[in-house]
Image: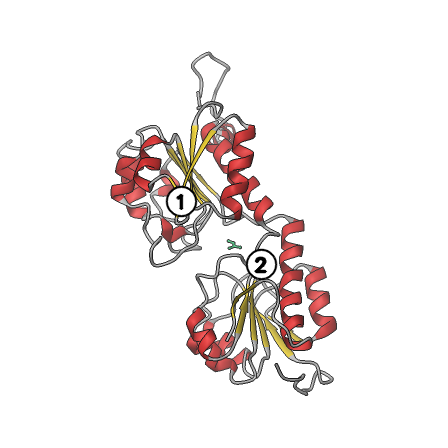
Amino acid sequence: MGGVPAGPGGGRPRVYVTRALVPRARDELARDFDLAIHDAEAPPPRGELLAAVRGAAGLVTILGDRVDAELLDAAGPALRVVANHAVGVDNVDLAAARARGVVVANTPDVLTRATAEFTLALLLALARRVVEGDRRLRRRERWQWAPTFMLGAGLSGRTLGVVGRGRIGGEVARLAEAFGMRVVHASRGGGLPLDRLLAESDVVTLHCPLTPETRHLIGARALGLMRPAALLVNAARGPVVDEEALVRALEAGRLGGAALDVFEREPEVHPRLRELENVVLAPHLGSATREAREAMGLLCAGALRAVLLEGRLPPNVVAAG
Ligand code: GLV
């Protein structure tokens, strides 16, 4: 890998960041690079993004950014590294990056705990009707304690089917075992066949990456195999679930409920999902702890530093030209 390109930032490589970052990550990037940031939670309009990346040696992108040939070419030949501020890289065209000699890094490990804890939060909220109860109180509905009032399902002794047994799936399994759940898993590397997991599980939780093979993995057929009272949790990627098929199964009472942190056309939420009481909705908060987001930002900064300043590949590399 070559040297540091000279530029108006005092010879420091130019880096463009597509969203506001937590202060520590931002400060670290500002120390090492000639930094430009789209300093907002909303994405830059595509045209603005394509113009802003021109001449950048490094990019920090997030999961809503489409990192494709068009964007890589808009950046131009100076571009050497894209650090995707997420563990999933389904928004990045890895082949296009490889073809242009651009290194792609992600943020594994540091968000495993946060995402697994949030998965349990979703599951508990759904199984014990926490959000539904909160809504009732906010609507000022009359209520009183009664032996039959708002009964949910306990977790202990129930079977949890983990789809995708990577780092996050493994951590979810560990936490669920502490709640007394029996855990089974299905993944490319082994475990139960998916159909059997779906038929046996009281709760199905998704932790696989989004790939052409996993898109709509949970569609009408898979949902039809699940137990009628089963719960579905998705804190992976929205398109792993066929949302229309899920809505139909829920409306027909063929499923106990769903807790969703991710959506097929994010940030849009299927309007009929909002109408269902046995659905918990979250705005993609899986890794949203202060400590995870700080560590994710620092990992991105470290990847840019490795490639642009130290001429080496970072440990969190997912594609290298
Ligand atoms: C978040 O969804 C991530 O992939 O890190």
Q: What is the tally of numbered marks visible in this picture? A: 2
Q: Residue at x 46, y 11 (%)?
A: 147
Q: Residue 107 carries which label?
A: 2
Which residue is more in the foreground, 65 or 46?
65
Q: Residue 56 carries which label?
A: none
Q: How crowded is mark 1: few (under 14 residues within 10 Å), some or many (20 or more)?
A: few
Does ligand 1 reach within 8 Å of label 1's beta carbon?
Answer: no
Residue 87 visible, this angle? yes
Instruction: Using the rendered view, name the quadrant where residue 103 is placed.
Output: bottom right
Kindly give the residue lying farthest to the front in the view shown: 190
Does ligand 1 reach within 8 Å of label 2's beta carbon?
Answer: yes
Q: Nearer the viewer, mark 1 or mark 2?
A: 1
Gap between marks 1 and 2 measured at Cα: 25 Å
Q: Position of residue 133 (x, y in %)?
A: 49, 28
Q: Which residue is drawn at 54% across and 58% down?
A: 86
Q: Position of residue 49 (x, y in %)?
A: 51, 74
Quadrant of image for the N terminus:
bottom right
Q: Mark 1 vs mark 2: which is more N-terminal?
A: 2
Q: Where is residue 160 in the image (x, y as percent from the top left)?
A: 43, 33
- Pointer 1: what residue? 190
| Amino acid type of the residue that numbered disc 2 sits on in the rendered structure | Thr
- Secondary element type, mark 1: strand
- Secondary element type, mark 2: loop
Q: Residue at x 45, y 46 (%)?
A: 207
Instruction: Using the rendered view, name the quadrant where residue 118 is placed.
Output: top right
> Do callouts 1 and 2 mark residues in contact (Cβ within 8 Å)?
no
| Amino acid type of the residue that numbered disc 1 sits on in the rendered structure | Gly
